[in-house]
Amino acid sequence: SSRVAIVPNPLRLQEPVPSDIAIASAQTPKPIAQLAAELNLSPAEFEPYGKYAAKVTLGALDRLKSCGDGHYVVVTGISPTPLGEGKSTVTIGLTQALYAHLKRPAFACVRQPSQGPTFGIKGGAAGGGYSQVTPMTVMNLHLTGDIHAITAANNLVAAAVDARYFHETTQTDAQLFSRLCPKKKGARKFSDVMLLRLHKLGIAKTDPDDLTPDEVARFVRLDIDQDRIMWRRVLDTNDRFLREITIGEAATERGMARKTGFDIAVASEIMAVLALTTSLPDMRERLGRMVVALSKQDEPITCDDIGITGALTVLMKDAINPTLMQTLEGSPVFVHAGPFANIAHGNSSIVADRIALKLVGAPAGEPVTADNAGYVVTEAGFGADIGFEKFVNIKCRASGLVPNAAVIVATIRALKMHGGGPDVVPGKPLADEYTQENLELLEKGFANLRRHIENVNKVGLPAIVAINAFETDTAAELQLVRTLARAAGAYDAVPTHLWAKGGAGATELAEAVVRCCSEARENSKFHVLYDHNLPIKDKIEAIAKQFYRAGSVSFSDEAERKIEQFTRSGWDKMPVCMAKTQYSFSADPALKGAPEGFDLPIRDIRASLGAGFVYPLCGAMQTLPGLPTRPCFYDIDVDAETGDVLGLF
């Protein structure tokens, strides 16, 4: 392919730094068709959604399959404060620096923000200051509708499972059969998805009229155990009162009420499938094998059994294509998939990374060097104990892609908190410790960053520390972190000023990344942490003891029972996705710094067969957040004169 064109969109920096939304409004993005042309995408390979976003089709991958991949960089962080430490800002700003300042082809791959945090505590996830994806209003709201598609697909499954239970409870085998395979012009026929169920039952027949009464009974009766329906409903709103609900209260449901609950949309297994799939046929297969319930005979019941797989694939067929946007400085961004990192696997999609790596990669037949290949910067949620661990053991295992370097984002304030500083509470002013020089707290709290550097090195990756600098950080504080980080085994540690200066505030970081990638490619030592064929408990212990430094792992009776059942069902050969607090290496959010020797309690464990992992729940993780006393929505409005959105951040 001919090289991608690098056409920066110059920033006009202002002091003091205006609000995110004011910065975004002042910078007109390039039309999306122009950006697509700069990337050499053919008109058939992108579909515009409005002026500044487009879906890029997977056809681009086929066209570029003989090209080399670009350099692959993952951005992770230390254990954060509730304010977040600026991973998105660094991901975007680093890409702006590589593209607009070092003039290298560069692509950022980030997750689509959930509307839960956007209207809740944390706000949007488009970066901040002069390092943003733009237009941030588009990105933080409906974008191209992918999360809505997931919500629709997820809840169609939920409705189908309860309805099937209802119909089986109220009908005979013959009634069920005549309705599932009605006579049309005197003949019955199976739909395609029904043939999958027959195959699973070992019934090698294609004509409904050939089934024996026993075969009819096995075919029509899923025999769902109502107490073991695992599929939950979702919505993309922080609505705490839906965590536990009773459904089926109307008289029409004939006393079949049951307890269930909602999760946040981005925690749906369908979101994990979207993030981990590699193609449309692969997505269809994954959706089909999702387990929705167990039968009274302990048999897993899947979406294929319910007969819904084709419909789910139709609802998701556009969502599989990553959404192309841009940074404030005009570099390309893929926004695709948005699983939370504490309760799901916390990484943007494999297909977005793959397409981006090819678009900036070396031309076919040329060896990849520092000069002929660009950079893909992808982001893993929360600290390196969570999103990065899952990036390595779940995402890279599924994609086969090999990263060249990891960037660990740290802030002086979070390190001081880990050193024993006062609680950091959203909406309350920061304590003096955080705004005045305090080298003692900083050095104590460095233990948290040291642990994350060791963990990144443990899987054979070089770690570059990006210190996301605030105006209150002193020169001595920044220098102390640089010195300690290099001594702890970091490839380099670089202060950045991305929020205030955009890419210009990260040129030193970008240069370190370029140097590191060319060295790392020569002698890659990257490897996953554990063999996925190990027993479930061994995999959990590998993560707990090697990454978290737990002394022991304890399993509740419920978790023990499920591990036995999963192992019997042959679900023990998949990687593990830990649902754990992001605020500590342990399951206790109050345990800061670098604790070790603690016990990690596994309260429950669930299986995601479509995503291809089992997920243990550590401690008291909530799968649906709540709203605070003063949610972000108080500040969000629309300018009645211009129609502009106000107050998003």
Image: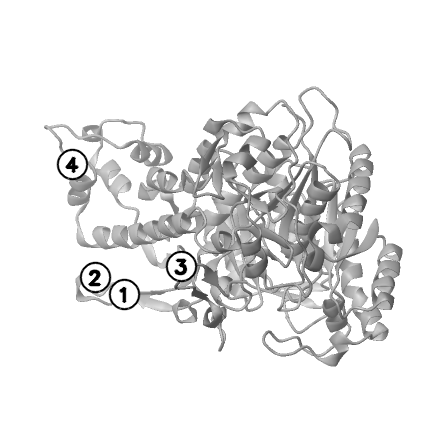
Q: Percent position (x, y) of residue 429?
A: 65, 78
- Quadrant location of the N terminus in the rendered image: top right
Q: Earlier in the sequence, mark 4 or mark 3?
A: 4
- Alpha carbon of mark 4 to alpha carbon of mark 3: how far? 35 Å
Whole-angstrom CA distance, mark 2 to mark 4, is 24 Å
Q: Which mark is residue 257?
A: 1
In the rendered structure, are the residues bearing label 1 and label 4 in contact, judged by CB atoms less than 8 Å apart?
Answer: no
Q: Which residue bears the numbered disc 3? A: 235
Report helix, strand or loop for mark 3. Answer: strand
Tell me if label 1 and label 3 are in contact, CB under 8 Å.
no
Residue found farthest to the top: 365
Q: Are marks 1 and 2 in contact (CB under 8 Å)?
A: yes
**Residue found at x 44% / y 47%:** 146
Q: Nearer the viewer, mark 4 or mark 3?
A: 3
The numbered dot on residue 253 is 2
Q: In the rendered image, is residue 45 in sight?
A: yes
Q: In this orientation, does residue 542 appear? A: no
Q: Is residue 554 above or below residue 460?
A: below
**Residue linked to disc 4:** 182
- Can you say which quadrant of the picture contains the C terminus? bottom right
Quick one: 281 or 42, which is closer to the camera? 42
